[in-house]
Image (cartoon, grey):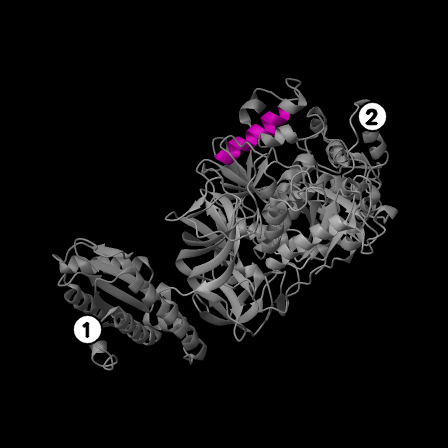
Amino acid sequence: MEKSAEREKMNIVIAGHVDHGKSTVVGRLLVDTGSLPQGKLEQVKALCARTSKPFEYAFLIDALKDEQSQGITIDSSRVFFKTTRRDYIIIDAPGHIEFLKNMVTGASRAEAALLVIDAQEGVQENSRRHGYMLSMLGIRQLAVVVNKMDLVAYRKDVFDAITAEYAAFLKNINVAPTGFIPVSGINGDMLSTRTAALAWYAGPTVVETLDAFTKEPAPIDKPFRMPVQDVYKFTNFGDSRRIVAGHVETGRLGVGDEVVFYPSGKRSTVRTIETFNAPQPQGVAAGQAAGFTLSEQLYITRGELAARAGETRPRVTSRLRVSLFWLGREPMVKNKSYFLKLGTVKVPVKLEDVVSCIDASNLNATEARERVERHDVAECVLKASKAFAFDPMDEVAVTSRFVIVDNYEIRGGGIIREALNDQQTWVREKRFVRDAKWEQSGISQEQRAEKYNQKATLLLITGCKDAGKKPLARRLEARLFADGKIVIFLGIANVLYGVDADMPAHADAKSRSEHLRRLAEIAHIMLQVGVILIVTAIELTQDDVQLVKTVVNPDVLQVVWLGESITTDIDCDLHLPNFDDPEACVDQIKALLQEKGIIYKPW
Amino acid sequence: MDHLDHLETISVRILREAYASFKSLCMLWSIGKDSTVMLWLARKAFFGHVPFPLVHIDTHFKIPEMIEYRDRLAAEWKLMMIYGENTEALAQKQTFPDKAVDRLTCCRLLKSEALKATLNGTGPRFRFNHDKKCYEPDPNPEPYTGVIAGVRADEEGSRSKERYFSPRDRENVWDLGDQPPEFWNQFKTDFAPGTHVRIHPLLDWTELNIWEYIKREGIPTVSLYYNQGEGTRYRSLGCYPCTFPIESNARTVDEIIEELRSGALSNIAERSGRAQDKDDGGGLETLRREGYM
């Protein structure tokens, strides 16, 4: 129990194969560091003697479970002990059913780990599996405890062989252990005291190793990353502030800095940093809960990743190469939709490919597989239903970590190794460069919207050939114009023979995409004026819409399908089955625009 | 950042995740020090506002000062204040003070049952009317799917097994043998229809942290926590027939912090003044499995 606020605390986790002596090591640490209630050890020893059971330190942990109602030394999921250096909390102590699930939970909150290997049994499947998972979970400090040295007569060659084997394994997965320590938990060798039995070992004891672990400083030197948790506008409480809220994962941000939100690419400048019951700060940094207002109002939502202009930008794509571990009872399979959660993003994903599965029993990558089984660690390709922002593992670790949700439960987790190209990558990259170079008009979008009484909008009317798209577009243009709206119909031909004059008009897929990109770029410029722009095109697919959304701001786009049946995979905002009554069709589109707040309803 | 900033940050992140993830969200407010700190943390997270209802289960055996304090803060902080109760058990006097049932059954009826019915909307809810300064029946019977509760892991055994986001089934039952993994600040925010999720922003806080934070932030607390000259104070608040003060001379927040740091209370459980715990075999686990906070 905490006695004073000033003592440093460190969370650690104990991992290792079953029966390699995790509990014994923990029990011994409690005894040797004097962290037990008075008389407890004697009491448990006496109980063992009475019941003719050989005393085991692991019994201490069970016995201490009854202690909770009195002073708190231990509970079933956390063990506390202290050294002169600091207080330690062992999270999710051994002995749980479903150990792996709990180890993952514990390890993700831990700053360091002890991995226990039985000297007699040597490196086992879970020794490797746990080592691999600890490295994936981001444990930077790992010490390997070779336990039960008493059972191998304290032989140095046994210890050396295990050290060599496991060190080679760790090297293979890019983990540099703090050290290997030979111990006997049962006899108390090298836990906190050196003994003659291990005189050949000159390195630090377990306690010395723990005390040499360092607290990891907050990653303020990395690029600024803050997943947007929400944008708060508590107007019903009489508060007009619009606050972008989130937890700063890395880097720092100050008043006056330009922020860029991904995947949208929207930019603005930090006007204020908001707090409650504290003086208003000028900056925030990694590890802080933050909230800031912007100098220009942007429509952004939860799931965007805030970055700072001028720093390395996060990746944006919908295809990822990942390493993941699977905890679900059912295997992870192809052609099934899961949810991926990363930061504040939640997006449907499918397993596209299992590149390799790590066989934990020998750590050889097996040949490609169709599925990821429970407790497997695999390298996979995932395809998300839309692009989102993240970082690759070796750039910003925290924003590379994701979990997979299936049927309401977290079933797996992993790290993104690499951003793979998707169909929009070539357009998206152009767009980010364009936005960074964009010369901002002195008049904001809000000012224009207020002046013209309308929101800039791109209305895409699509459908089969001869469905009446152009006549509908012209009717709509006329009606909106008569209502006093600033509106224009832009025919494809206007672009095809002018801006696209350098390109073949009738085209393969590649030039079709380029035609569409240029059309969208023109739309983007026209939208800056604040107009309602009506464009018609034949049989657009969802990929086409995604491409347009990648070029213009996704929230300015409205899609209408005209015609009986929808012949592509498109998601439209409005479906008009026929053009029999043109005025009724126009009414329906106007209703859509009113409902979305693009034009106002008449009084 | 000191240790209180760090704890505050963890709690704020959890509260914001809860607010973003649950359409029908509420916060349980027992009027005690922990859930009042939690309420304050909500004001931190939402920049002075509390954008979800506060739910108090009123057994009508609470120490009167607690109810005065509740309604004073509800008015001052413009809280969406709701209380629920087990009207039937109260009317039939099925209570321990009425000598009809034992302590544990009384807790089960007036707290666990009342809580279950208030949360799932089958029981009565009373909402504070800020204009009239009184409670009126709440017309909203929508079940709460996210329930924020102020449990701390160090408080007593069963609470240490909790996750930040902890699922409850239709019967409010907690399956603590098979809990979902929780890592990288990704929480269980998905749930099947009919079930709900308990959210625990204070899991990492200790009793001492709570008092240190009350001091730092100047959070108002009920005077029952302080020695008024009798040489006793309440360490944990509940119903007056079952809650007893401890011996203590601490008159102020500073003196309580000093008392806790000195270790004077380290061998006395925080809830030792709560008689129902003892009737539950020294732990709250039975009550908690059934949905007790």
Residue A434 position, x and y percent, is 41, 77
Q: From the viewer's perspective, tell me whether residue B125 is left or right of residue A177.
A: left
Eye-nearest disc, 1 or 2: 2
Residue B108 position, x and y percent, is 60, 26
| Residue named by callout 1 | A506
**Residue depicted at x 47% and y 62%:** A304
Residue B98 position, x and y percent, is 65, 20
| Identity of the residue furthest to the top in this view | B100
- The magenta stretch is B106-120
**Residue depicted at x 69% and y 41%:** A20
Q: Quadrant of the C terminus of chain A?
A: bottom left
| Residue named by callout 2 | A49
Q: Amino acid at mark 1?
A: His
Query: Which SS class for mark 2?
Result: helix
Residue A174 position, x and y percent, is 61, 60
Distance from disc 1 to disc 2, alpha carbons, whole Å, reads 91 Å
Q: From the viewer's perspective, tell me whether residue B282 is left or right of residue A325.
A: right
